Image: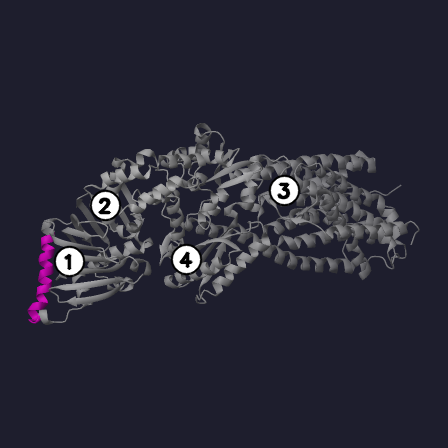
Amino acid sequence: MSSPSTLAHLVLLCSLLTWLPAAADPGIDAAPFDVPGLMELLAQVASRKDHFTETKTLAMLTQPVVLKGTLAYVRPDRVEKHVTSPYAEDLVVQGDRLTLTSAKGTKQIAVENHPLIRSFIEAIRASLAGELAVLRRLYHIKFQGTRRQWELTLRPLEAQAAEYLTSITLRGEGDRLTAVDIRETGGDRSVMEIDGPVS
Amino acid sequence: MTLHARPALLLWILLLFVSGGILANMTMTTDLTALLPRFADHRQELLVSQLRDGVAARLILIGLSGAETEALAQASRTVARKLRDDTEMFASVHNGDPADFTVVQDVLMRHRYLMSSAVTPEHFTPAALREALERQLQLLTSPAGALTKAALPADPTGEVAHILSALAPGEGPSMRHGVWFSSDGTRALLVAETSAPGFAMDEQEAAVKAVRTAFASSGLPESAGLVMTGPGVFAVESRATIQRDAWRLSLIAVAIVTVILFSVYRSVTPLLLSLLPVLTGLLAGVAAVQTWFGFVHGITLGFGATLIGEAVDYPAYVFTQAVAGERLQQTLSRVWPTLKLAVLTTVFGALSLLGSSITGLSQLGVLAFVGVLVAGFVTRWILPALPPGVIRSTPHQVLPLTWLPALLSLHRARWIMWVAAALALTILTLRHEVLWDNDLANLSPIASPSKALDEQLRKDLGAPDVRYVVTIEGASKEEVLQRSEAAESLLRRMVDDGLLAGFELPSLYLPSDRTQQSRQAALPSSDVLAASLAQTVKGLPFREGLFQPFLHDVEAARMSQLMDIVNLQQTPFFLKVRSLLVRTGDAWAGLVPLRNVTNASALADRITREAGPGLTFLDLKSEAGRLVNGYRHESFRLTAIGLVAMTVLLWWGLRDAALVGRVLVPPLLAILFVVTFLTLVGERLSLFHLVSLLLVLGIGLNYALFFNRPFVDDEEQRRTWLSLTVCMLATLSAFGALAFSRTPVLHAIGLTVALGAAGSLLMAAILGRQQVSR
């Protein structure tokens, strides 16, 4: 994991990079922004680690459950979701291996074998990695917004995943991910707000 | 035609009719149990029942490759669906498709409170329920929640997940696009289980064909390939190869032998007559086996035909000795004393096999005994009674015969043979550990690339290797299941200690009645459970009345009947239980296949020391080895007895100890040299070699008998040389052709007999002495 100062450098560098073409073209916000453009933008971030607050609204429950923790990504294929409250649970995806560690113990599964879990993971991983080809293979993609504020909606193509999952919507500002909104077929919904980078 | 030929002819025709009549109703079997010793121990019985009926013996592992992953996955589904439609041929077909997992889940859901080992009275206390619900809440909010929430209202304590984790602790094969794939993603994998047992060749062949047909219509491009392995597939393949090979090589052998015999006889009649003794002998021999045992084993037929192969030589000894213009009867009167001994030595040799406790060997004994005796009878009394009866011309001596006298001159150098024999004995003593092939699998003629492919597919599919099992014996099904339950904790400890990777137990699929009853007793009544639940849910965000299905199902399970094997029908567990839990006579046995055993001896040790009554660790490979070993020792012992009988017979016939030695030693030396040669070129001796060596002994004795036969004049000596050369060349070419077969069985028999025949004559010439009769 990069130290805060390196991260700061990176952020600075990235903002410089995004700012540079803007200097050449003053009409940046008006310029058309599309999925390949977004992918290119996101692919430039080598690693990130943010606090999140996830609110799950489920039909079976009388009130939403709120999870807090951190979400981290390291190029190209490492995603970590650490839940710290209301319980502790670590979910680490490295390549095809998913490792789930909780108070009960550790469990490993191959992501490739579980289409639904893969649909959850790849929506975040492949997006942050900027791997458009992977996204196109797994999801129907809808995009709207501008470079400053965008929204990427993914609907799973695979039948087994589509049975449970309606859509995953990623929202962001520039190269920053601000929210992940998951809607399941039964009406259950989970909204993960990215609060800001871990300092 | 002489007068006494008439009754002989009538007898022969009668024999043909009776034998033919018996054979018309012949019962052929390829069942391995028929080959067991009559006093087989229960382990051997279990071994054979596994080879025969075990699920492992019914599996066809299928791989599809050579196309895009997605196309292969689609084809996998198509093939699976087509095979499943054929419910008569296939008991089950699996390709990892989650669709067939729903059936399993339904059955587990229905019987979860009787099957789950977590069910105890403490399991439903408010404290335990609280813990379970908190765990479910956490699961619900994780990504997996989308999958698990459907079952939550009915199964908040997670029994189905608990049962599944006990049944399949591993991950199973890799998946791509929802079906099983090899770990590198190039090959879609399926497993089909035939309804017919592995040894039912015709059914297995039909199953293999059905898989091919399904593959052909699966819509894959030309480039795609299909591979299949499994015991049944191998058996079908090797049968086809053997048939093809045997047919082709027999044609070649027949052609060569015909050319040799025709160039000698210059006439078709003796050629055709030559076949009569051996064919009649085979017919009568098989009929005798059928009458005596009530059935004929396929292996007996194959080996028996080899064993009485020497009868082909009998007419040759007569025809080549004939002088122009004389009646066959006259020729016979000269040759018969020697030929009689040749026939009787083999008959006596076979006699000892009759006493074997192994059905397979005693069948072989009966076949050889009757077959050779009848062949001798036909040669002596039928051939001269048939037209033409008179030999028109002397056999043509196209063959250079000077090689035999040349060998005779080597007589003085025969000490070399003794040195060579001593050397050979030393080599065999040094290498006695690697002399024999004890692997029963090698008796089935599978080419090794197929074996490697099979291993690869098995690894990809995580199928158990079928070498190590623990057996559980008991007086009743219930007792076996109770013992199976008792064994679980020991096996788990051994998995934790790294002695093996995993195991299966019959009780994992079907708990004993006692356990089911105690689980039922542990379930709380609906009032109590409802009260506990109400107390538990307080403070948790679950919706009111969410767990109503749970209350309902627990009450239903409390009142339900105990589950039995039939409740598992339509799931893959049904066949599994039936293969893990077998009836053996009036007792029952449970089988515990072990996965990836890393330390077999430590495992065996701990099972002997720590396991309860009725449990035995079994290494099927070494058990099979013991079975083969038993066969070998028995046939050795019997051959030794047979050899003594032959010696007595020879002394009775020859009345000359030195002569008996000169007759007996050459074939024995030849056998010694052949065995040494085979060992040196890296062949391991199997039962096939052993039976071939018995034939070599029979043929070799005949050579030595004729070689040492006193002669009246040079002309007779030359005729004897001709006889021997013709017989040896015929055997050499017929069996030499077989030696070129790619099939291990045919190759072994061919090579051994061809070398043995040539060697026997060589030894007979070098060690023999020809004398003018007084």
Disc 2 and disc 1 on one polypeptide chain:
no
User: Does dot 2 land on a helix, a strand or a loop?
Assistant: helix
Circle 1 residue: A177
Residue B497 in the image: state x and y as whole percent: 37, 34
Q: Residues within 10 Å of mark 2 (few under 14, many from 20)?
A: some
Query: Where does label 4 land, which residue?
Result: B187
| Mark linked to residue B17 | none
B407 versus A122 height, above or below: above
Quick check: is A15 in the magenta stretch?
yes
Q: Mark 4 is on which residue type?
A: Arg
* Res B368 quadrant in image: top right
Between A122 and B658, the residue placed more toward the observer is: A122
Q: Position of residue B356 (x, y in %)?
A: 68, 37
User: Distance between the Cα atoms at labels 2 and 3?
Assistant: 60 Å
Q: Whole-Å distance between the Cαs marked 2 and 4?
A: 37 Å
Residue that sits furthest to the right in the current view? B3
Kind of residue at disc 2: Gln
From where the camera sits, is residue B162 visible? no
Q: CA distance from mark 4 to mark 1?
A: 38 Å
- Chain of the residue under the numbered disc 1 shown in the image: A
Please name the residue that numbered disc 2 is placed on: B138
| Magenta span includes A78 | no
Q: Are marks 2 and 4 on the same chain?
A: yes
Q: Disc 4 sits on a residue from what chain? A: B
Q: What is the magenta segment's predominant secondary structure?
A: helix
| Kind of element beneath mark 4 | strand
